[in-house]
Image (tube, rainbow, N blue to C red):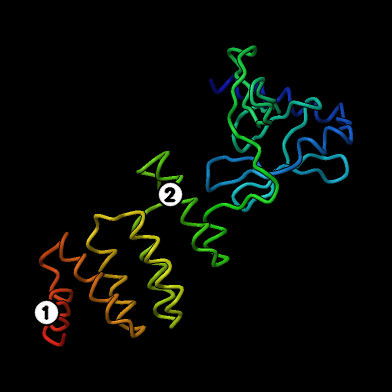
Amino acid sequence: MKIRVFLVLLTTIVLSCSNSVDYSDEFKKETSGSYLYNLDDLIEVYYDDNTLYLNWRGGKVKPVAIAENEFFVPDMYKKYHFVIHPETKKRYLSAINEDEASTITYDYLKAPKGYKTPSTLLEEGKFKKALAGYLEIKKQDSTSSYINEWDFNKLGYKYFREQELEKAIEVFKINVALHPTSANVYDSLGQAYLVSGDSLQAYINYKNSLKFNNGNKRAKEYVDAYKTKS
């Protein structure tokens, strides 16, 4: 395996040094754009003059060009090309199978122009759209690290500490939607509502927290006090 990787690297380096790939304007236009590594992670493909680049996870990557529609990415130890699905006519960034070169896989779908990941939408404060994206991720993989309960809780409390209570509430609401059987998410949302002055919503969420953890003392104390006051 090590020998094969070395040979691939050597071959691509030699090719890149001896031949410069001349990309057509049409090819650059059709292949430029963002490809879904997953629903919350994009691979951006772009060209600077006549050089192909990828932007992935915050890093700029310069692949080794082999031909107009074939390149090697050292960071991933794979060759890639662009393919179009025969039925959907959608474009994909596809890994080349070295053992079965004739086999075409449809790995990373080209995203529609203007597509934003749920995380980007969350950063922009577009909470409803972000939630829709996260729910789709959950639908495909309920154990995905992108919908981790504690990450949302941490972000919500960051806004909470910064006195951005509306943002904190929205983040906690996303957490409730993603993890509706967790006592903790209701407790956090209840606390945010309480500090914001919405006693009814605080009561509702603390009461929901008790359904999943009847040992939550803070929730029980508030629920009992709210009932007494009412």
Viewer-proximal residue among 20 and 5: 20
Residue 166 lies, in percent from the top left, at 44, 76
Q: Amino acid at mark 1?
A: Asp
Q: In this rendering, would 188 be left or right of 225?
A: right
Looking at the picture, does residue 2 appear above or below residue 204? above
Please give the count of numbered marks on the rendered protein: 2
Q: In this rendering, would 2 be left or right of 180?
A: right
Which residue appears farthest toward the front when viewing the image? Answer: 230
Looking at the picture, does residue 84 appear above or below residue 154? above
Q: Residue drawn at (28%, 82%), measured in percent from left and top?
A: 199
Residue 129 lies, in percent from the top left, at 52, 57
> Label 2 belongs to which residue?
135
**What secondary structure is found at the residue carrying circle 1?**
helix
Viewer-proximal residue among 201 and 172: 201
Q: Amino acid at mark 2?
A: Leu
Residue 56 lies, in percent from the top left, at 63, 46
Q: In this rendering, would 30 be left or right of 166?
A: right
Crowd around label 1: few <14 · some 14–19 · many ≥20 (10 Å): few
Crowd around label 2: few <14 · some 14–19 · many ≥20 (10 Å): some
Tell me where residue 150 sits by quadrant. Answer: bottom left
> Label 1 belongs to which residue?
224
CA gap, disc 1 to disc 2?
Answer: 34 Å
Q: Residue drawn at (38%, 64%), measured in percent from left and top?
A: 173
Mark 1 or 2, nearer chain start: 2
Residue 95 lies, in percent from the top left, at 62, 26
Q: Do labels 1 and 2 touch, CB within 8 Å?
A: no
Kindly tell me whether residue 167 is visible in this rendering: yes
Q: Residue drawn at (13%, 79%), measured in percent from left and top?
A: 221
Q: Residue drawn at (76%, 44%), measured in percent from left and top?
A: 46
**What secondary structure is found at the residue carrying circle 2?**
helix
Q: Quadrant of the C terminus?
A: bottom left
